[in-house]
Amino acid sequence: MATVAVTDATFEQEVKNSDVPVVVDFWAEWCGPCKQIGPALEELAAEYGDKIKIAKVDVDSNPNSAAAMGVRGIPALFIFKDGAPVSNRAGAAPKAALKSWIDDSI
């Protein structure tokens, strides 16, 4: 499964009402570290398949979701399970570190 673009309008449906755990990446086009982790998140989305969903929220176009989660810097990553955040981390990280964090959280 590829990453899913999520908006303020679809956040509740795609993230909070998801049947599988969701990794939410709050990012922006101008953010260098966000671009660094983008390919790793795409690869992880393919590797996990239907077991998890990886959602990307552009904070410039969708400020309400970021504000509701208290995002102050990007990239900001959250894992939602059963509709609630269970873990979060900020900043870029290598793919192996992201995978380990996801595995430990779900």
Image (cartoon, rainbow, N blue to C red):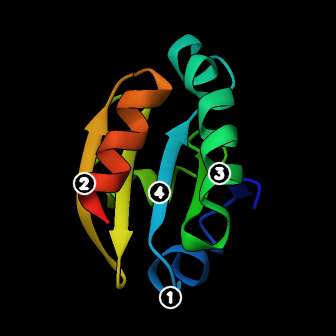
What's under tag 3, amino acid-wise?
Answer: Glu
Question: SS of the residue at dot 3?
Answer: helix
Instruction: Locate residue 73: give its quadrant.
Output: top left
Which comes before the other along the chain, label 2 or label 4? 4
Question: SS of the residue at dot 2?
Answer: helix
Left or right: residue 59 compared with residue 72: right
> In x, y percent, where is residue 30?
65, 17
> In x, y percent, where is residue 77?
39, 44
Question: SS of the residue at dot 4?
Answer: strand
Is residue 51 depicted above or below 77 in this figure? below
Local crowd size for mark 4, using a 10 Å CA cut-off: few (<14), some (14–19), many (≥20): many
User: What residue is shown with label 3?
Assistant: 47
Please give the label number shown on residue 104. 2
User: What residue is shown with label 4?
Assistant: 23
What's under tag 2, amino acid-wise?
Answer: Asp
Is residue 53 depicted above or below 77 in this figure? below
Label 4 – label 1 distance at C-alpha? 13 Å
